[in-house]
Image: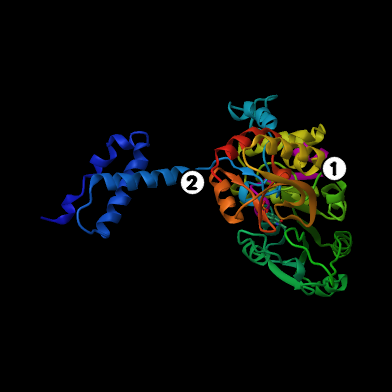
């Protein structure tokens, strides 16, 4: 007899009582995979119980990969791997109504004709940033691509070598420039670029001067770059376009320590024709690219067929709209990223104390420093308070992680940093820690 005959039928596995709680499609998928795997490595008779056990394990693994909430105790506020900016629950509530019903997304309620999905948000952005025009795309990477493709196709863009960065996820400035159909003219060296380097590079093919914010690393020591003020003047003198890819970029109400030497969007706009930044970094909203600047250039972006491919969904628009409204109304508490960045040390300590008092394990309260993150302000850190746990740091880190609590290791100790932990997570955090077996 064919030994493979000894295998139970897939149907027989799927309908087994022990897999009752799992969805049919998932059971079928993993049963087939497990059976095929056993057949390939067949050694003797396999009983149904063993197979079921393996299928169940696969199913549990799969379910665990679902997007789920975690507690960010790394101290890094804009943590790219943990979803960058968090949407405040009250802000979410304000969006719910327009998301969970039909809306005037592309409908003019006054005249009953087709309207533009962006109008109301763009008006708010123009007021907030005091600029002529604005545009929204999927993310800032898309913004960079659209700007270059619309304004510099088949022409030459001048950029400093020191700013041809890779920003994570394999997004490399030189590749993006090339992919947009634009020729790159690199000037300066990786640590120093002077205004004369730009001047010397000008030729009849030049069309745009690009400045990129070195957002995820900092250069210390023997270094110089040309300010956007000077690049803006140079561009204007030579009838070129000046574009600043800000990456992050802060808007308002950020504590002084962080904003020192950091470009503020509104100020930069006075010196360049066009700029772009991510909406889910320091701006504190959802994933999107915000493009601001002179009307004549943004209008060109709008005419690019690509825009349709980069357009955002009504969910994104609803969230961006509420975040922008919160800025306009100076309701900064509705912007989680700002709230955490501006949080006072005494309040962070209160949060840590509450947890320390209510958990069954011993911990040490210490002051420490946390990072802004998200490719923002790599050379700046913020005072914070951590709870430090005794024991093997790597093992502790893993045990906490299994409870969806992501901490960090500091000087060989496992710590929870309370700067990035929100007030309304404390009870859950206490509950989860007390479930641990350390
Ligand atoms: C983050 C960043 C980008 C990409 O923005 P996404 O919104 O992640 O697509 C581009 N340029 C710079 C300088 C950045 O910091």
Q: Using the image, determine if residue 265 lies above or below residue 184.
A: above
**What sort of colour scheme is used for the picture?**
rainbow
* Image location (x, y in percent) of residue 366: 76, 48
What segment is highlighted magenta in the picture? 122-142
The location of residue 181, given as percent across then percent down, is 64, 64
Residue to which mark 1 is pinned = 130
Residue nearer the viewer, 103 or 80: 80
Label 1 crowd (10 A; few <14 / some 14-19 / many >=20): some
Q: Does label 1 or label 2 sit earlier along the sequence?
A: 2
Q: Quadrant of residue 40?
A: bottom left
Is the residue indicated by label 1 positioned so its CB lies within 8 Å of ligand 1? no
- The answer to whether residue 269 of the structure is visible from this angle is no
* Label number found at residue 185: none
Whole-percent x, y for residue 11 in the image = 24, 41
| Residue 403 seen from this side | yes
- Count the marks: how many? 2
Does residue 136 belong to the magenta stretch? yes
Nearer to me, 160 or 92 = 92
Q: In which quarter of the image is residue 205?
A: bottom right
Q: Which mark is residue 65?
A: 2
Q: Distance between the residues labelled 1 and 2?
A: 44 Å
């Amino acid at each position: 007899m064919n030994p493979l005959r000894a295998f139970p039928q897939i149907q027989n596995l799927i309908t087994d009582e022990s897999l009752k709680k799992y969805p049919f499609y998932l059971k079928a998928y993993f049963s087939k995979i497990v059976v095929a795997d056993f057949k390939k490595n067949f050694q003797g008779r396999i009983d149904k119980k063993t197979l079921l056990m393996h299928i169940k394990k696969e199913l549990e693994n799969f379910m665990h990969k679902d997007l789920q909430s975690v507690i960010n105790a790394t101290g890094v506020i804009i943590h790219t791997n943990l979803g960058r900016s968090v949407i405040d629950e009250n802000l979410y509530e304000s969006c719910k109504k327009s998301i969970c019903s039909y809306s005037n997304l592309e409908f003019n309620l006054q005249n009953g004709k087709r309207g533009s999905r962006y109008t109301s948000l763009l008006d708010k952005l123009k007021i907030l940033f005091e600029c002529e025009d604005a545009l929204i795309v999927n993310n800032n990477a898309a913004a960079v691509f659209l700007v270059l493709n619309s304004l510099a196709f088949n022409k030459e863009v001048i950029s400093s070598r020191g700013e041809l960065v890779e920003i994570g996820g394999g997004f490399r400035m030189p590749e993006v420039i090339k992919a947009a159909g634009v020729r790159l003219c690199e000037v300066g060296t990786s640590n120093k670029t002077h205004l004369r380097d730009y001047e010397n590079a000008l030729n009849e093919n030049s069309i745009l001067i690009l400045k990129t914010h070195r957002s995820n690393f900092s250069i210390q020591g023997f270094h110089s770059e040309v300010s956007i003020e000077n690049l803006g003047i140079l561009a204007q003198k030579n009838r070129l376009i000046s574009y600043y890819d800000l990456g992050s970029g802060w808007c308002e109400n950020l504590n002084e320590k962080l904003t020192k030497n950091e470009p503020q969007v509104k100020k930069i706009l006075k010196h360049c024709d066009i700029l772009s930044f991510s909406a889910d970094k320091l701006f504190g909203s959802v994933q999107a690219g915000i493009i601001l600047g002179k009307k004549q250039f943004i209008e060109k972006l709008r005419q690019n067929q690509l825009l349709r491919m980069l357009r955002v969904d009504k969910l994104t628009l609803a969230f961006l709209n509420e975040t922008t409204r919160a800025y306009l109304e100076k309701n900064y508490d509705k912007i989680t990223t700002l709230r955490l960045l501006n949080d006072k040390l005494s309040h962070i300590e209160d949060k840590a104390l509450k947890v320390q008092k209510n958990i069954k394990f011993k911990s040490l309260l210490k002051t420490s420093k946390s990072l802004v993150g998200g490719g923002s302000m790599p050379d700046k850190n913020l005072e914070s308070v951590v709870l430090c746990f005794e024991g093997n740091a790597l093992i502790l880190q893993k045990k906490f992680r299994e409870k969806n609590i992501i901490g960090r290791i500091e000087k060989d100790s496992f710590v929870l940093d309370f700067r990035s932990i929100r007030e309304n997570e404390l009870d859950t955090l206490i509950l989860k820690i007390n479930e641990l077996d350390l």
